[in-house]
Image (spheres, rainbow, N blue to C red):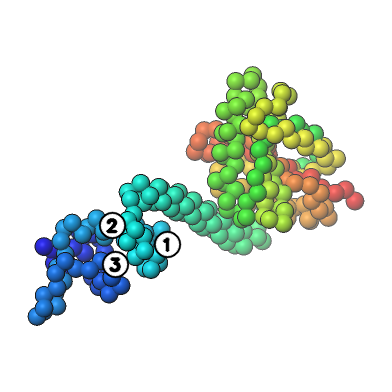
Amino acid sequence: MLSIGAFAQIGQVTHRQLRHWDSAGLLVPAHVDEFTGYRSYDPSQLKQLHRIVALRRLGFGIDDIAAMLDEGVDTDFLTKQLRIRQAEVEREYRVAAARLVDVERRLHLIETENHMSQIEYVEKPLPALRLAARMAVVAEQPEIAGVVGPMFDDIAAIIGGVPGALDTPVALYETVEEGMRVTAGYVYKGEAREGFDIVEIPAADAAICGVHLGSMDRIGNSWQALHTDLLARGYVPSAACRELYVRSYPEDQTDWVTELQQPIELP
């Protein structure tokens, strides 16, 4: 038999949780001393304990857990549900981390909003583009980083064998009612294939353009500076902004070169 302390330590739960589950009838001690009230547990009860903890982690309430335990919860069910929850938690973590980066970026923008940008901007027309692309809508800006890379990777896996097909990666970003519409792909002259769409991007008579050097973590700062310059010139955006990835390797992004392109309305 195991004392409540030893059972709690092995099961990585608290005494309070064990007492609560005892009161709820989920995990009743194998023995309770009639004089001292000390609870003791049989090692075989660890199996039940692990199921209760797993189901709680999945968000089930006490009553639901009791019903499932009465019916019997098999290992396959728990494993499948925990894998699903694991994926959800990992996604939540990535989004939270991206939000933190976004908060830091916006704080930096506020702190430096009165400083001149070192990026030089030019006004020029943009050509029409034919892309092998995928599109997605994200609810918040911090989610973009987790979406764009896989979109490029999936398309590259399909057309990577075509000479020159991966030379010009481009992404477009446009605010929509549901959030941000992202279009990511490669300038492409080949035939349509399953796994991506052919997206025709019209030419723009004029755009304000600048070059962002280095990590994508700070590209928001460059976009903010570009839009500040754009407004100072008396222009307004006329279409989705574009990012042309002139150099997008190696993975550490130190030497990346990205041209920012914002189509504008001419007076």
Residue bearing mark 1:
59
How far across and how far down the image is residue 246, in percent? 64, 33
The quarter of the picture where residue 232 lies is: bottom right
Query: Is 31 displayed left or right of 232 in the figure?
Result: left
Q: Alpha carbon of mark 3 to alpha carbon of mark 2: how far?
A: 12 Å
Q: Are marks 3 and 2 in contact (CB under 8 Å)?
A: no
Question: Which residue is found at the position 81% from the left and 37% from the top?
Answer: 202
Q: Which element carries disc 3, helix, strand or loop?
A: loop
Q: Alpha carbon of mark 2 to alpha carbon of mark 1: how far?
A: 14 Å
Question: Which residue is found at the position 66% from the left and 38% from the top?
Answer: 134
Camera-side residue of 195 and 119: 195
Tag 3: amino acid = Leu
The quarter of the picture where residue 204 lies is: top right
Residue bearing mark 3:
26
Tag 1: amino acid = Gly
Sequence-wise first label, 1 or 3: 3
Q: Are marks 1 and 3 in contact (CB under 8 Å)?
A: no
Residue bearing mark 2:
50
Query: Is 101 displayed left or right of 74 in the figure?
Result: right
